[in-house]
Image (spheres, rainbow, N blue to C red):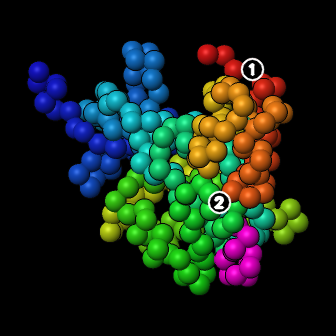
């Protein structure tokens, strides 16, 4: 009983080299997670709400318990996400729409709300923006066009995300850390993209939960260049494209995958109500899932 009373409730904001940094009442404690995995089979993640026991006189602080998670993501590895902020660059690097759609699909699967951000809008025209808008208009996702250089869209984004714990994910070099800095006045390291490959240089190495004024709570995460949709049956995928929902009922077969079946009402509206880009990414991801049997 005495021991329980001495436990402190906090949140893991960072994990490096076997240490976890736990924020509790404005203080940050460096902790170990000794024996926790052996006892529970669960490894701590950034975002976890935990109970820690403070050590004294040379004894380290220890995470004793991980409280139940609302959700957890594998890439990036974070837990308890309230809003998924998917970041792409409008240019430099060019957006890869199938990659963006994979991130969207994973967020749908995890049932988090989504905001889609196109950064570096100082590099594109209004016409370019309209082309991007057209791709996602049917999804219902909020799409925000921003530039951390000019400040465009930053306050709009702030309004959309404040008060919710946001996971930022996206390719390296799209500006995730720059956005975190612009939103919350943080000083996260940012890095130039490679001139030759037009890709980021993986500047951010660790996931970190940043808390700032005005209800800003952001997981800054390392960018990645490839991404596979995990733990999903191919038949599930269609439910993670919100714009399919209104059209599915017209298909001849209730089991229609909207790939090669006859009388498919989804395929009928591709290029109209459903953007070709989105449909193409659906087919691509569907085929990838088919080729890669997943154990359940
Ligand atoms: N033109 C332009 N460049 C930007 C903008 N925002 C950020 N950048 C630049 O893009 C580069 C990458 O920015 P970062 O914030 O490091 O990108 P990141 O997504 O955090 O990258 P990783 O940490 O590697 O995943 C830097 O050189 C930034 O200065 C913008 O609005 N416009
Ligand atoms: Mg970064
Ligand atoms: Zn169909």
Magenta stretch holds residue 252: no
For label 1, the residue is 293
Number of marks: 2
Name the magenta segment's main secondary structure: helix
- Given residues 272 and 127, the one toward you in this image is 272
Q: In the picture, residue 105 is in which quadrant?
A: top right
Magenta stretch holds residue 123: yes
| Alpha carbons under labels 2 and 1: distance apart | 29 Å
- Given residues 238 and 153, the one toward you in this image is 238
- Is 52 on the left-hand or right-hand side of 254? left
Considering only vertical position in the picture, is 145 above or below 82? Answer: below
- Is 149 on the left-hand or right-hand side of 83? right
Considering only vertical position in the picture, is 286 above or below 215? Answer: above
The residue that appears at 39% across and 15% down in the rendered structure is 39
Find residue 279 and name its label: none
Write the start and end of the magenta stretch as one range.
121-132
The residue that appears at 16% across and 25% down in the rendered structure is 3
On the rendered image, what quadrant is the N terminus found in?
A: top left
For label 2, the residue is 136
Q: Where is residue 198 in the image (x, y as percent from the top left)?
A: 82, 65
Q: Do the residues labelled 2 and 1 touch (CB within 8 Å)?
A: no
The residue that appears at 60% across and 72% down in the rendered structure is 145
């Amino acid at each position: 009983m005495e021991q329980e009373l001495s436990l402190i409730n906090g949140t893991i904001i960072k994990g490096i080299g076997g240490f976890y940094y736990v924020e509790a009442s404005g203080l940050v404690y460096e902790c170990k997670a000794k024996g926790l995995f052996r006892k529970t089979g669960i490894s701590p993640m950034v975002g976890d709400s935990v109970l820690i026991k403070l050590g004294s006189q040379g004894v380290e602080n220890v995470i004793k318990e991980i409280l139940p998670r609302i959700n957890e993501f594998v890439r990036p590895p974070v837990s308890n996400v309230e809003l998924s902020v998917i970041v792409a660059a409008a240019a430099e690097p060019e957006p890869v729409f199938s990659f963006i759609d994979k991130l969207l699909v994973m967020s749908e699967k995890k049932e988090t709300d989504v905001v889609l951000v196109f950064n570096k809008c100082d590099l594109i025209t209004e016409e370019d923006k309209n082309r991007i808008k057209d791709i996602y208009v049917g999804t219902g996702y909020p799409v925000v066009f921003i530039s951390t250089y000019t400040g465009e869209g930053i306050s709009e984004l702030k309004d959309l995300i404040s008060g919710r714990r946001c996971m930022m994910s996206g390719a390296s070099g799209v500006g995730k850390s720059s956005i975190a800095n612009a939103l919350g006045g943080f000083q996260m390291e940012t890095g130039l993209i490679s001139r030759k490959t037009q890709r980021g240089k993986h500047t951010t190495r660790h996931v970190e939960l940043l808390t700032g004024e005005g209800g800003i709570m952001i997981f800054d995460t390392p960018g990645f260049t490839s991404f596979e949709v995990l733990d999903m049956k191919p038949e599930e995928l269609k439910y993670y494209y919100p714009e399919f929902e209104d059209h599915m009922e017209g298909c001849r077969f209730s089991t229609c995958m909207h790939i090669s079946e006859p009388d498919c009402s989804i395929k009928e509206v591709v290029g109209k109500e459903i953007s070709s880009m989105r449909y193409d990414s659906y087919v691509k991801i569907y085929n990838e899932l088919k080729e890669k049997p997943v154990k359940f």
